[in-house]
Image (cartoon, helix red, strand yellow):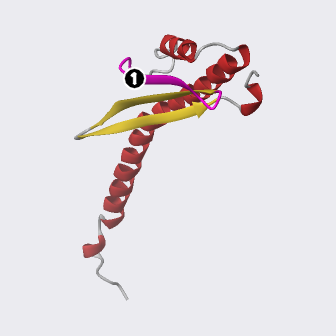
């Protein structure tokens, strides 16, 4: 019972190449996206810290904007980021907006960061 399997040659090799190509594309996308997302997370945490410090020490909202401007390079935030510090209900808040392009072969993804953080209510001086 010998069967002719000439039409089955190479099918597993082709599947392997397709799976590896997909895994490489996903890996490359993660390689580009994860550091940007991580720096955005750290920058948001820094925003919260500066807002809480400003509220606890009675500093004006402009101080928060100045401190964030100094740290833009550290968190790889574009220099054209829009930083809007303000006071609302006796709480300091800051809004930061920027767009960072991530260039993939044949496609450019625009990572948009638009976060607003407010100081904690228990820091509000009376």
Q: Nearer the viewer, residue 110 or 34?
A: 110
Q: Which stretch did the figure color magenta?
A: 78-90
Q: How many marks?
A: 1
* Residue found 50% across the figure and 10% down from its top: 70
Query: Where does the C terminus fall, quadrant-wise?
Result: top right
Q: Quadrant of residue 124?
A: top right
Q: Pointer 1: residues within 10 angstroms few (<14), some, or many (20+)?
A: some
Q: Position of residue 110 (x, y in %)?
A: 33, 37
Query: Where does the N terminus fall, quadrant-wise?
Result: bottom left
SS assignment at label 1 = loop
Any magenta on residue 86?
yes
16 w.r.t. 121: above or below = below
* Residue found 39% across the figure and 45% down from its top: 24
Q: Nearer the viewer, residue 113 or 1?
A: 113
Q: Position of residue 5 (x, y in %)?
A: 30, 77
* Residue found 57% across the figure and 18% down from its top: 61
* Residue found 41% across the figure and 34% down from its top: 32
82 w.r.t. 117: above or below = above
Any magenta on residue 88?
yes
Q: Position of residue 84 (x, y in %)?
A: 46, 24
Q: Is residue 107 left or right of residue 43?
A: left
Label 1 sits on residue = 81
Farthest-out residue, left:
106
Q: Nearer the viewer, residue 22 or 10?
A: 22
Q: Position of residue 36 (x, y in %)?
A: 46, 31
44 w.r.t. 73: above or below = below
Q: Nearer the viewer, residue 23 or 125?
A: 125
Q: Quadrant of residue 44?
A: top right
């Amino acid at each position: 019972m010998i069967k002719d399997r000439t039409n089955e040659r190479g099918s597993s090799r082709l599947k392997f190449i397709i799976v590896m190509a997909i895994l490489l594309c996903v890996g490359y996308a993660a390689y580009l996206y994860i550091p940007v997302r991580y720096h955005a997370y750290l920058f948001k945490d820094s925003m919260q810290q500066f807002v809480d410090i400003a509220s606890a020490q009675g500093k004006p909202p402009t101080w928060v904007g100045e401190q964030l401007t100094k740290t833009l390079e550290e968190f790889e935030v574009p220099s054209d980021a829009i930083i809007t510090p303000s006071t609302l209900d006796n709480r300091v808040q800051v809004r930061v907006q920027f767009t960072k392009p991530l260039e993939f072969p044949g496609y450019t993804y625009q990572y948009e960061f638009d976060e607003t953080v407010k100081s904690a209510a228990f820091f509000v001086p009376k």
